[in-house]
Amino acid sequence: MSGLIQIFDNKKFVLSNSRISYMMQVNEEGILEHLHFGGAITHPEYFQSQHKRVLRSLSPEFQGMPQFSLYDLPQEYPLFGSSDYRQPALHARNAQGNSIFDLRYKAHRILDSKMPLDGLPSARDGECESLEIELYDELQKLSVFLYYTIYANFEVITRSAKILNQSANSISLEQAMSTCLDLPQQDYELLHFGGSWAREFDAKRHELPYGRFTIESARGTSSAQHHPFMAVLEPGASETWGRVIGTALMYSGNFSITLERNEFKDVRLLAGINPFNFSWQLEAGQTFTCPEVVHVYSGSGLDRMSQNLHGFIQNKVSPQTFAHAARPTYLNTWEAAYFDIDEKKVFELAKYTQSLGLDMLVVDDGWFEGRTDDRRSLGDWTPDKKRFPSGIPALAKKVKDLDLKFGIWVEPEMTNTDSALYREHPDWILHVPGRESSLGRNQLTLDFSRPEVVENIYQQLDELFSCGLIDYVKWDMNRTMTELGSAGHPASRQGEIAHRYMLGVYDLVNRLTQKYPDILFENCASGGNRHDLGMLHYMNQSWVSDMSDPIGRLAIQNGASHIFPLSTYSSYLCPVPNHQNGRITSLETRFNVGFFCGNRGVSMNLEDVAQDESAIKNFIQRYKHTAKDAVNGSFHRIFYTDNEVCWQLISADKQTIYVGYFSILTKPNAAFRSALLRGLDQDALYKKGTKIYSGSALMQAGLDLPLVSTTQNSDASPSRLSDKERVEVLDGGDFVSTIIVLEKS
Ligand code: DGJ
């Protein structure tokens, strides 16, 4: 690929495709100044810096350069300590004990590809160009290499940074961010997502305050509390209007994303490893690589941002073997049987899986040595001798003889005090000397900062997977980190443990997914406690939340859809009353919410299924017939309120449109609702049963949604509504829903 990056006078760098431009320049002082990230700029050679040099009282100036201060200059990789008082991208302590560094432009080169990052997940190569810019501190002999990649077909720029210590002394890194984006002086709103266990991805939107606003994790995982993503919006931006810049970190550990706004309305976004509780000894000659960041720009609202991210993640982040493949429908044993499983019961469930018409049986937690509850056995990845005497390969073979695929659950990063692994290696957990380690779900975190621990788990999992009979692996991680210390590293390196842990996880996942490319891996961390681009680089999908109630899931799936394509998250039909919140919903509503996930299944036992068996079979057939559309279709949020949700999915061939409408609590005498659809062919005709609509009518006037009726005896019941031909009614009270299907003719 060529022509995506232009350089003018050896000092102005322009990364452009037909829709976006990212621009920067080396200014007179040699500082790399940020110029623009947004819509495509034509004739970039004439583009002028918007930074005004004026005397600001109380702002220090460079000697001999009156009115030049870094405090209000938009920069690409700023430092603290000369004249910029905002949060820096890099903060470090040198051999003299001070933290003053000074980075000036040194060199650059253009690459016609995307290079992988050292030991870290990164976006994939293809139809892109990359730019490397070296900034250098002459006194401290420190280089910072900034990496930028632009793709021909995505409104996306990826960035990362690598720090090289060329001095003879050790330097202590205290803050090494992946990116700095200094934005134009305007008002902004912020949109980010978070919550807690079973209510992940709740959308939070507010004005950018004066001062600093940070989302972060210090839990060791990217977390359910704050997902590593932030959108900066033009005030009032909607799904279809307004300029939006989204920033997603491709990292699964402690992160921070900070927005800072000073008295001049200069706005700085920093994203990277959380500097809190972090330090890194960078010895002479060593490099440190910061995780990658994806910046996405939309000039027309959140929908466009999501379309771009969805396409980018599916094509440039996800492992490509399964990225576009219809996913197998499955029965998962968890909500069907929890720990009460043995090979006989699993086989019974497998026969049931087959009779329901599903594609795969997944054995969740509870199959390995001694694992009869959540207090024991993590770390011992061999089948329980009493309950699974024939072993996993024999069980997998029997299941596969039923013409089913076979999947299995593991939680590789954990152990329990009651396990052979812990008894043999009590110092292999994250811990600090002299203190008891806190438990989370009765378990301890293995010290993945130590290569020998990673190697042990690799050997065990390799042994399990090598039978060649496993089609799917659910990789779980059910606690956050505490007593963050490692017996494998000296005192001076204890600030490195959380990041080294992540490098260990990525190493393990990378080796296993490379060795077993035909296994479909699903990421899970008590649901969505680590659903991020980092894990999705290695695994195609995530169990996005333990919340299996469809009404509880509406907000979660709606929030997650801002960033992730449907192909990356899973659902299953659960029993009622729901095990997480006790809610009773119809099978249809459970099906309809699950429909808007790329991976669909069931987690019910034989008795649960018996009540609705034929309906479940029908729904499973519908899941199977639409499996490709769920993975490859384009998804739009039509509206989302506290009481009503409407989603649209357009099949990849654009022939079929699915409109999901969900009503939470019924209101008497409700207003009529319609859905302004998106992404249709305006000249085409679309059929819904006997009705025909033009694409333009559906997008400009909308599709009528059914009126939700109250109880059978009320005035608004279907039998009382006068013109049933014209008014469609959704009967059934609370938690009702429908999927309307339109076919292009
Ligand atoms: C937490 C996961 O989110 C559940 O789906 C299930 O796999 C349990 N762990 C098993 O322990």
Image: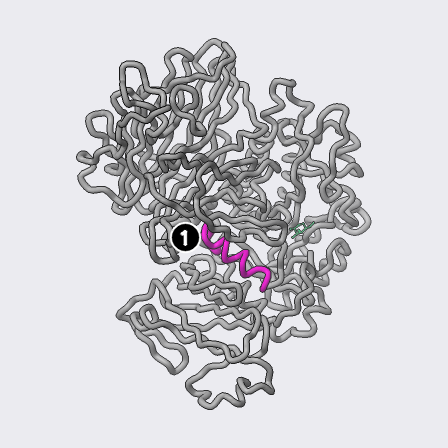
| Residue located beneath label 1 in the image | 306
Q: Is 342 placed left or right of 309 in the picture?
A: right
Colouring: one colour
Query: At 65% from the left edge and 73% from the top edge, which residue is drawn?
Result: 613
Query: At 53% from the left edge and 33% from the top edge, which residue is drawn?
Result: 274
Query: At 65% from the left edge and 40% from the top edge, which residue is drawn?
Result: 480
Q: Is residue 1 visible?
A: no
- Give, as a single range, the part of the protein colored magenta: 551-567
Above/below status of 457 relative to 342:
above
Q: Is residue 565 magenta?
A: yes
Disc 1 crowd rating (10 Å Cα; few below 14, some 14-19, many 20+) is: many
Query: Among all residues in the image, which is located at the extreme right?
Result: 386
Query: At 53% from the left edge and 47% from the top edge, which residue is drawn?
Result: 518
**SS at circle 1:** helix
Closer to the camera, 320 or 20?
20
The quarter of the image holding the N terminus is top left
Magenta region, main secondary structure: helix
Q: Is 518 placed left or right of 577 in the picture?
A: left
- Among the 4 quarters of the image, the one containing residue 112: top left
- The image position of residue 567, as x and y in percent, is 48, 54
- The image position of residue 345, as x and y in percent, is 75, 60
Q: Is residue 281 magenta?
A: no
- The image position of residue 46, as x and y in percent, is 17, 35
Above/below status of 75 relative to 652:
above
Closer to the camera, 506 or 433?
433
Q: Is residue 177 visible?
A: yes
Above/below status of 185 relative to 611:
above
The quarter of the image holding the C terminus is bottom left
Q: How many marks?
A: 1
- Among the 4 quarters of the image, the one containing residue 431: top right
Closer to the camera, 517 or 680?
680
